[in-house]
């Protein structure tokens, strides 16, 4: 994916000083696109690569990318443990695509040794759309976000194969496959709202961050 936002410009002149402090996990993947969207919505955005940076935020986005790489780097950087603790402690976290994979309690078609952080009571299958149809766009009904459909871009995306009693389905494809879920402060989508100009998922996430930051 192309990016135009330079790292040092994240937040500089783009953030509202009063906005919630939202981190974007910046180990790999399209973290700059998320940072851009969040800053545009008034969040005070920072990139997270270290436990101290994680400790300074009120919410976190885990971007799309390659989940096996994000997994490896999070362990190498000593972030996996703090991330699990933060999730268990109620930190609002939004995962898109690889980020959803990172949040799933159970993975299918993971590479050998791949671990997720967990938190979402779901089973997620990586690369679920097969080689013929790895990337596509569609319109999704997401009743929690209003009546207008959400334009959703899938890029070698996962699907949620089963949803446990603690998680809630937010959106499914026409064939019934689940592609957006939430559970308390956790939100996950198989697709990438950060690259379509669709901001309602980020706004929905920010409302969770603001509610927790106030409490
Ligand atoms: N297939 C990737 C993975 O397994 C996810 C793709 C994406 O994030 N766009 O992590």
Image: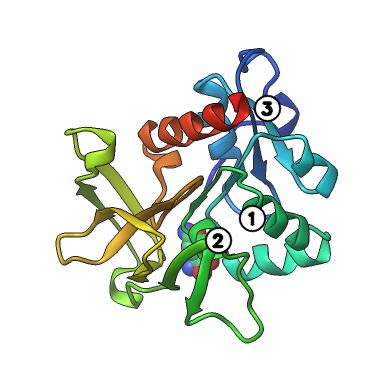
What residue appears at the point 32 percent right and 59 percent down from the top-left corner? Answer: 179
Q: Say which element carries label 3.
A: loop
Q: Which mark is residue 119?
A: 2
**Residue 40 x, y percent position in the rendering:** 52, 22
Instruction: Indicate yes or no: mark 3 CB to ligand 1 under 8 Å.
Output: no
What residue appears at the point 56 percent right and 58 percent down from the top-left corner? Answer: 65
Which of disc 3 and disc 2 is earlier in sequence? 3
Q: Nearer the viewer, residue 168 or 8?
A: 168
* Mark 3 neighbour density, 10 Å: few (under 14) some (14–19) many (20 or more): some
Judging by the rendered image, the residue that carries numbered circle 1 is 88
Q: Which mark is residue 210?
A: none
What residue appears at the point 52 percent right and 28 percent down from the top-left corner? Answer: 211
The span from disc 1 to disc 3 (Cα, nearest Å) is 28 Å
Quadrant holding the C terminus: top right
Q: Say which element carries label 1.
A: helix
The reply to whether callout 1 and callout 2 are in contact (CB within 8 Å) is: yes
Which of disc 2 and disc 1 is earlier in sequence? 1
- Compared to residue 95, the image places residue 12 above or below, namely above
- Compared to residue 14, the image places residue 204 above or below, namely below
**Residue 145 x, y percent position in the rendering:** 28, 35
The span from disc 2 to disc 3 (Cα, nearest Å) is 28 Å
């Amino acid at each position: 994916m192309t990016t135009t936002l330079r790292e040092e410009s994240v937040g500089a002149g783009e953030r509202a000083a009063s906005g919630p402090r939202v981190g974007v996990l910046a180990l790999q993947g399209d973290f700059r696109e998320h940072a851009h969207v969040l800053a545009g919505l008034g969040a005070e955005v920072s990139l997270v690569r270290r436990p101290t940076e994680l400790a300074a935020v009120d919410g976190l986005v885990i971007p799309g990318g390659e989940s096996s790489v994000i997994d490896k780097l999070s362990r190498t950087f000593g972030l996996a443990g703090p991330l699990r603790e933060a999730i268990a402690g109620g930190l609002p976290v939004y995962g898109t695509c690889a980020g959803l994979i990172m949040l799933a309690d159970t993975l299918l078609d993971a590479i050998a040794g791949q671990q997720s952080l967990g938190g979402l009571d779901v089973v997620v299958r990586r690369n679920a759309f097969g080689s013929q149809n790895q990337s596509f766009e569609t319109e999704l009904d997401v009743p929690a976000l209003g009546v207008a459909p959400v334009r959703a871009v899938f890029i070698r995306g996962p699907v949620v194969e089963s949803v446990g009693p603690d998680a809630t389905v937010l959106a499914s494809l026409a064939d019934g496959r689940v592609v957006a879920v939430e559970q308390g402060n956790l939100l996950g989508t198989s697709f990438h709202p950060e690259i379509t100009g669709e901001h309602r998922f980020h706004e929905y996430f920010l409302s969770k961050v603001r509610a927790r930051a106030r409490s």
